[in-house]
Image: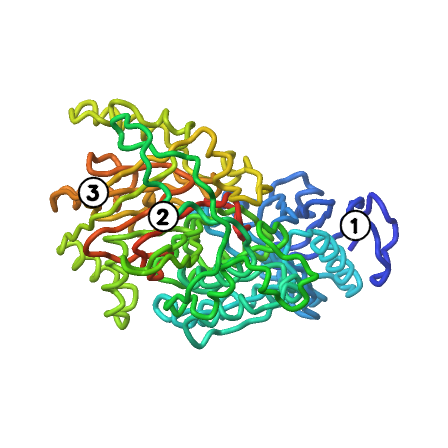
Amino acid sequence: MMERRTQNENNPPENIPFNVEDSIFSSNLFLDDDGEVILTQTSDRLSWKSVESVLNGQDPSSCFGIELVSKSETTLCFSDVYSAEFIDWGLVHEAAFLGQSFEMYRFTIRGVQKSKTQPSVLVPSFYTFGHKDSQTCQMWINRINDLLNMDAERPKNLLVFVNPKSGKGLGCKVWETVAPTFSQAKVKMKVTVTERAGQAIDMMSSITSRELSSYDGVVAVGGDGFFNEILNGLLLSRHKCSYPPNPTELNHPVENNGDGPVLDTNVDIKDPSDSGEDESPLLKQSTDLRTGDDSYQTEAEDVDFSFPNEKFRFGLIPAGSTDAIVICTTGARDAMTSALQIILGKAVCLDIAQVVRWKKTSTSKDEPCVRYAASFAGYGFYGDVITESEKYRWMGPKRYDYAGTKVFLRHRSYEAEVAYLEVESEKKNIGPEKESTGSWTKGLWSLLKKSERVACRANCNICKTKAGHTSAKCPSLQPYLKDSRWLKSKGRFLSVGAAVISCRNEKAPDGLVADAHLSDGFLHLILIKECPHACYLCHLLQLAKKDGNPLDFEFVEHHKTPAFTFTSFGKESIWNVDGELFQAHQLSAQVFRGLINLFASGPEA
């Protein structure tokens, strides 16, 4: 077999480095099930052609009118390659219809391709090449791996947590399915299978900055709640910021324009202060880490590790009950897709909401307690469903359907007051048609709103526009305070929800808010006012419908805001923060734009 080079006439010795980035190299090799091909490598891709097609000028993709699997030329970008490995002496087959095979040295190139039926799903692909000379095989392996190692975005060392009880209890099985792919990509892993609730948050909060800096990221194998544990373990101990306003600070109306009281924006943004003990098992071991107090010092504090942190990414391999975060960030609820995006070093920024509880009950003292959320925080219906579902854990994910039905039939509403920061740029989205009770104007408004939707997709232009994080005094709110005002909504609510992302899942294909983005710096505040049973059912049915309009009802308020406060009155529900229970009488929340980086690329169209 002949070998051709445009540069480097001789094979470089395998232990001497060479500049693979500037070289173009080609060899004649045998491709398993395809026959002899010319394999060519450039700085950014591999490609191969059948020798027969080159010599005869023919396309071997068909024979006697029958189309074959083989194509005249195949291209594989290095961005889609994750390993090349030697597999020793063995058989390499010619084209399937010829039935011949040869013994030679072989190596396999592993890559990624999109599923033909689902554009967001990634599947592994591999190609086995052979050559009579083992050094030729080894040279190709070295060249490919050298190019892959030059990609600084790809993780080399990961911290992995597996929740064996997530979803249907298949966390370990899911990890066993994808773990060999990480090994093939030569990613080092420190794997911990958790044995109790709260173990992940304890470990992440106690890890030193020096040790954390030795990893390229942390991966959660589990559901949204398990991801929330790991997120809080890191952010509670390392994210230093000011709290959003306490609801009691926003009780001085300055004018009334018919939309509710307008509140003074000249409120002091509090610095973090000592917080009281939280009874939640999730945060029990970490209450002293929420304060931002200089008295807390990790070992080897000379290593700077703070957020946002572009070098350290979070990963999530779905094994939960809903897996909304994975669906919103990869477009698919598929463990292998998530694993491959992690291995290839994909990155997308993600907004994170900081939720601060000021009072646990109406009689409690002010003792701020912090929780972070990556997807959703909800009160009323959403909290009641989680509370009810705890009684039926033995049912697995089906417990949410059962609990949801019971809570819906109760149709319980709660009195509360919500204040939200109105953003000047969002006023254009609220028109007089929205206020009208006429059905034709309501329908017109729905059509206009639907046409304005810009769904978040891979390489989203909205998410690419980054906001600065340089202000130490509440960086997420500071840009809005000058031209914004606080508005109030008070009454009885079936639910109060704040979506950080669209929260797409298998039961809500477009999510709670179809046009929510991964990193736009806004919360979507959804207030469902008390309404007849049938009306609320219509809202839920629209939520479960593809291209539905769940927010276009008169009893639904939807506000795009960077912050809000909440106070309950009378009988209380409980908050659901990323699937975890959080009791609060007084609460406030703010969003931090692009606070973390995720191993994902965003959903495909």
Q: Badge 2 is on which residue? A: 504
Residue furthest bottom as drawn? 195
Which amino acid type is shown beneath numbered disc 3? Gly
Q: CA distance from mark 3 to mark 2?
A: 28 Å
Which amino acid type is shown beneath numbered disc 1? Val
Badge 3 element: strand
* 462 versus 321 height, above or below: above
> Residue 410: which disc?
none
Residue 35: % across, % down: 64, 55
Occupied quadrant, residue 107: bottom right
Badge 2 element: loop
Q: Badge 1 is on which residue? A: 20
Chain-order first, disc 2 or disc 1: 1
* Foreground residue among 77 and 358: 358
Q: Badge 3 is on which residue? A: 491
* 161 versus 481 height, above or below: below
Occupied quadrant, residue 486: top left
Q: Could you classify mark 2 by the number of other residues whose Cα lies within 10 Å: few (under 14), some (14-19), or many (20 or more)?
A: many
Residue 267 placement, left or right of 407: right
